Image (cartoon, rainbow, N blue to C red):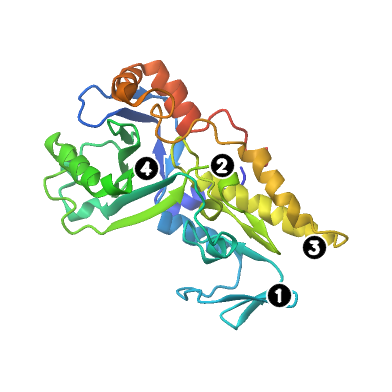
Amino acid sequence: MDLAFDLDDYGARRTLQPITGFRVGVMGRPDAVSIRYGRPVSYGIRRCEFDDYLLRRSGARLDLGTPVRSIVRQRDRWVIDGRVAAPILVGAGGHWCPVARLLNPRADGGAVVVAQETEFPVAKHDASAFTTEGDTPELYFSRDFDGYGWIFRKQDHVNIGVGSLNPRARAAATAAFVSELQERGVIPRRPTADARWRGHAYLVSPPRFRRVSGERMLLVGDSAGLAYPQSGEGIRPAIESGLIAAEVILESAADDSHDRLAEYDARLASRFGNGGAGFGWPSRLVPDAAVARVGAQLLKLPWFVRRVVLNRWFLRAGEAALAA
């Protein structure tokens, strides 16, 4: 609704995988819970296609593949690399966005998830060797509940990854998760040998940990640290914060009696609140010694997986669209 998205038009030329269920469990345990909705509750996309689609549809002038080396303030304009000038600067470059670094030169102090993932075409392998169903992504929490791994079949592609609050554990956790998927026969023995693994990081904290606005500049999405703390998902917060930023900028242009950009912080806080329970539940809610036992027991309960983990944390089913 927020993007006036035409599913038929998008899916005709790009990956659009309907999701009608999930399989959720704990790494290393055989008792994962399968939840079926009987209808599409979300869709899987490839970020490279989705980002390009939005970029082209925007009608903006593009200067792609050029890194930002300098940002300076000259009179009433921001000047980038001495050749691009604008009265307002919007940072949308992810966790390491240069605009975010300009606004936040020191460490934020928020919780940072480090993730490693790979995505590759099934055509490189025997498609029948991948047992994950396209409409049923699989999510497996780590035993300490400081992260989770996933495997997701998106039509002709497979996406595998692990996210964790512990940067030192990422590589070992990823290797162990892939090995577990292989042992269970979910993926073939060497599906990722030639796959390109990518690492990235993002804040999973409320905006209070990072300045999101300054002198004629705003941050959106991961640049503003808006990924949902329970799931680490950041596409919807990125879209919504971008729409809020656009609204505030247009209002500022229409009324130059005062700086309306200052209202951006308040609108973000109103929309995203304080984030609720953080990523890595229930380790934030119970003593460390009880984390594995409590978490594993909760994930055995279908009602908890459906109503809390999926509906509330991952699908955000109870939240109305921004433009509803």
Determine the residue positioned at 52% across, 66% down: 98
Q: CA distance from mark 2 to mark 1?
A: 29 Å
Per the model, the C-alpha gap separating discs 3 and 1 is 14 Å
Q: Earlier in the sequence, mark 3 or mark 4?
A: 4
Indicate the amino acid at tag 3.
Answer: Ala
Residue receiving disc 3: 253
Observer-nearest of 9 and 123: 123
In depth, the one of 39 and 266 nearer the eye is 266
Question: Does label 1 or label 4 sit earlier along the sequence?
Answer: 1
The CA distance from mark 3 to mark 4 is 40 Å
Mark closer to the observer (3, 4): 4
Q: Name the element at disc 3.
A: helix
Above or below residue 185? Residue 226 is below
Q: Secondary structure at mark 4?
A: loop
Secondary structure under the numbered disc 1 in the rendered image: strand
Does residue 105 appear in the picture of this structure? Answer: yes
Residue 25 sits in quarter: top left
Percent across and percent down for residue 295 are 34, 23
Q: Earlier in the sequence, mark 3 or mark 1?
A: 1
Q: Which mark is residue 77?
A: 1
Please give the residue where the numbered disc 4 appears in the rendered image: 165
Disc 1 residue type (three-letter): Arg
